[in-house]
Image (tube, helix red, strand yellow):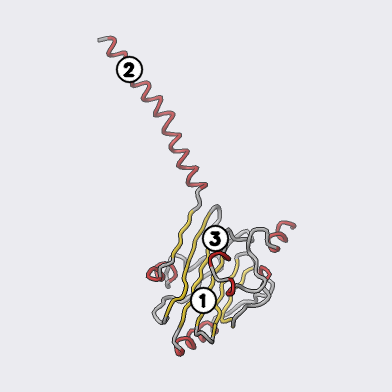
Amino acid sequence: MKEKSSKKRTGIIVGILLAVLIIPGILLIGLLSALFIPEKEKITQTEQYETYLGESGKYKENYVGYNDIFPDSLEKVSRVEDFVYYYYNPFDANYFGYLVCEYSADEFDKEVARLNSLESESYNGVYGIEEFPYEVCAVYADEVYGVMYALADREEKEIIYVSLEFCNYFTDIDYKEMMDEKYLPVGFDAMPGNETRKAFDRK
C-alpha cells in the first residue's frame, strides 16, 4: 500500500511540475505569436466589397480619414476590371486598395462629377508625386499617412481608385506588385528607404 501511495504522490508531483513548466511555455508561445506574426487580410471578391468598403465598411475609415473617394457600392458599375484590398500589420497597420471600374457613358459622367465635387488636396511633392498619368478626379494626400485618389480614363470610360495608407513614412506593402504601375503617380515612392522617410530620419 505504501509503495502505491508513494507512486501516486510521485505522479502528482511530476504532473504539477510539468503543468508549472509547460503551461507558461504554451502561453509564452501564444503571446510571441500574437506579437510577431503579422495580421493580414486580402479581399479580391467583389461580392465582399460593401462589407469592407461600403458606407459603414470595415476599412472605410483609416489613417487619411473617411474614404469617400471609393464608391459605397458597385451597383452602378458596368464591369469591375480589377479589385483588391489588402490589410497588412507587421507592427503598424498598412492599407492598400485598388479598384478599376468600367461605367456606362452616363454613369461615368455622374461618377466623375461626384468625385470632382470632393475637396481634393495638394499632392505635388507628397512622396515624390510630380503628376498623375490620367485625369485626376479626387486626391487626398498626406505627408505622413499616404495617398488616396481616383483617376478617369475617358477613352475607356473607366475610373481607377487607389488607396495607399500607412504610418512611419513608408509602407510595408509592395504595391507595385499588386497593381498596374501605369496607374501610379509619376515619381511616387512610399517603399522603405524612400526620400520622405530619409528626410524624417535626418531630423
Q: Residue furthest left?
A: 1
| Residue at x 51%, y 76% (from the top left corner) | 69
Q: Secondary structure at mark 1?
A: loop
| Residue at x 45%, y 84% (from the top left corner) | 103
Q: Is 188 left, or right, of 148 in this rendering?
A: right
| Badge 3: residue crowd in 10 Å (few <14, some 14–19, many ≥20) | many
**What amino acid is at disc 1?**
Ile
- N-terminal-most mark, 2 or 3: 2
Q: Is 10 left, or right, of 71 in this rendering?
A: left
Question: Where is 40 relative to 104, above or below?
Answer: above
Q: Residue furthest bottom?
A: 106
x, y percentage for residue 42? Answer: 46, 61
**Viewer-nearest residue: 187 or 15:** 187
Q: Which residue is mark 3?
A: 94
Q: Secondary structure at mark 3?
A: strand
- Which disc is residue 9 wearing? 2
Q: Is 128 left, or right, of 8 in this rendering?
A: right
Quarter containing the N terminus: top left
| Callout 1 touching callout 2 (CB < 8 Å) | no
| Residue at x 51%, y 86% (from the top left corner) | 113
CA distance separating discs 2 and 3: 55 Å
Q: Which residue is mark 1?
A: 69
Q: Secondary structure at mark 2?
A: helix
**What amino acid is at disc 2?**
Arg
CA distance separating discs 1 and 2: 69 Å
x, y percentage for residue 7? Answer: 31, 15
- N-terminal-most mark, 1 or 2: 2
- Which disc is residue 103 wearing? none
